[in-house]
Image (tube, grey):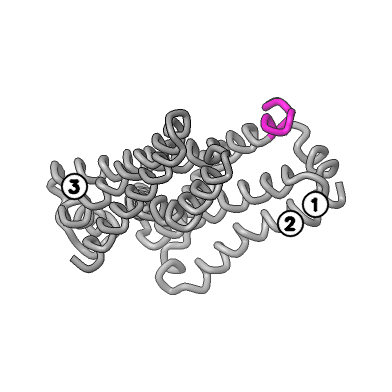
């Protein structure tokens, strides 16, 4: 239990303490630091922790445990500390969750209105996630294509887990956020502005930005499908197709930034 408290529990508790210190030091949030907003911030922590526990449960299942073993989390971390990546994965999941919660809670403290603060936090992350379609493409350029070509020329298939997780699951999630932002922006009467929601509306209404991102999303998905099913037909042809897809992605990205 000593390892769990020293290396896991205390660092986790330091994250909310850091956010609280930041709110007290910042003049913009200090004026809204009252009992109501603090209670709303703590209450906001509940859904974030529930999501974290969901992913912790999935991590436990990958290592042969069950979701019910979450009740024995301190004991499991003590046993796996320094031997399996499981303990580090759990640490990262909960740590990142607390960071995301702090960003949402900070948006709440900045506005002084719990509802508007939460909406601003959602707007900030919706904008970030919508742009992550480009990040998926960049990972394909740096890691996906080189490793896929190396595997194909060595007579192996590309990493299926990598392709499914990145180019299909994550890419589809970010694309869904992008499409939702686009539809809300086009059909909402909320004006574009400098506030987080206004910036999100401006982002969604910018056709010259959204369309290339959607094109990149489609190419990301095609890369995943070609990498998964192409080697069954022809490895050389698959390598050519993957290369052409990346060339098309780079062309779209060039137009996005310099067009």
Residue identified by numbered label 1: 5
Tell me whether circle 2 and circle 3 mark residues in contact (CB < 8 Å).
no
CA–CA distance in space, label 2 to label 3 = 42 Å
Residue 168 within the magenta-colored segment of the rendering: no
| Residue 201 x %, y % | 21, 53
Q: Secondary structure at mark 3?
A: helix
Residue identified by numbered label 2: 10
Foreground label between 2 and 3: 3
Q: Earlier in the sequence, mark 3 or mark 1?
A: 1
Q: Secondary structure at mark 2?
A: helix
CA–CA distance in space, label 1 to label 2 = 6 Å
Q: Earlier in the sequence, mark 2 or mark 3?
A: 2
> Over which residues does the magenta segment extend?
60-70
Residue 121 in view here: no
Q: Quadrant of the C terminus?
A: bottom left
Residue identified by numbered label 3: 185
| Residue 101 x %, y % | 51, 51
Q: Which residue corresponds to the image point at 40% horizontal and 34% vertical from the top-left? A: 225
Q: How many marks?
A: 3
Residue 242 in view here: yes
Q: Earlier in the sequence, mark 1 or mark 2?
A: 1
Q: Secondary structure at mark 1?
A: helix
Tell me whether circle 1 and circle 2 mark residues in contact (CB < 8 Å).
yes
Q: Which residue corresponds to the image point at 38% horizontal and 46% vertical from the top-left? A: 240
Q: Which residue corresponds to the image point at 78% horizontal and 33% vertical from the top-left? A: 72
Mark 2 surroundings: few (<14), some (14-19) or many (≥20) residues within 10 A: few
CA–CA distance in space, label 3 to label 1 = 46 Å
| Residue 148 x %, y % | 50, 46
Q: Which residue corresponds to the image point at 29% horizontal and 41% vertical from the top-left? A: 218
Image height of 179 relative to 249, above or below: above
């Amino acid at each position: 239990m000593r390892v769990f408290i020293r290396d896991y529990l205390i660092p986790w508790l330091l994250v909310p303490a850091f956010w609280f210190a930041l709110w007290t030091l910042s003049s913009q949030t200090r004026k809204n630091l009252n009992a109501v907003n603090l209670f709303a911030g703590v209450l906001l922590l509940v859904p974030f922790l529930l999501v974290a526990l969901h992913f912790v449960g999935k991590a436990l299942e990958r290592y042969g445990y069950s979701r019910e073993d979450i009740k024995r989390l301190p004991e499991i971390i003590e046993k796996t500390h320094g031997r399996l990546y499981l303990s580090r994965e759990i640490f990262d999941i909960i740590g990142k969750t607390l960071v995301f919660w702090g960003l949402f809670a900070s948006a709440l403290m900045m506005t002084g209105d719990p509802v508007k603060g939460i909406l601003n936090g959602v707007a900030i992350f919706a904008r970030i996630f919508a742009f992550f379609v480009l990040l998926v493409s960049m990972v394909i350029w740096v890691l996906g294509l080189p490793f896929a070509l190396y595997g194909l020329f060595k007579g192996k298939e590309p990493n299926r887990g990598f392709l499914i997780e990145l180019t299909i699951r994550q890419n589809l999630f970010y694309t869904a956020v992008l499409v939702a932002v686009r539809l809300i922006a086009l059909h909402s009467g909320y004006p574009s502005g400098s506030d987080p929601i206004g910036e999100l509306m401006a982002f969604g209404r910018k056709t010259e930005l959204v369309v290339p991102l959607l094109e990149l999303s489609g190419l990301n998905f095609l890369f995943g499908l070609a990498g998964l099913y192409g080697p069954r037909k022809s490895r050389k042809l698959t390598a050519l197709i993957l290369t052409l897809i990346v060339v098309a992605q780079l062309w779209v990205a060039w137009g996005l930034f310099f067009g």
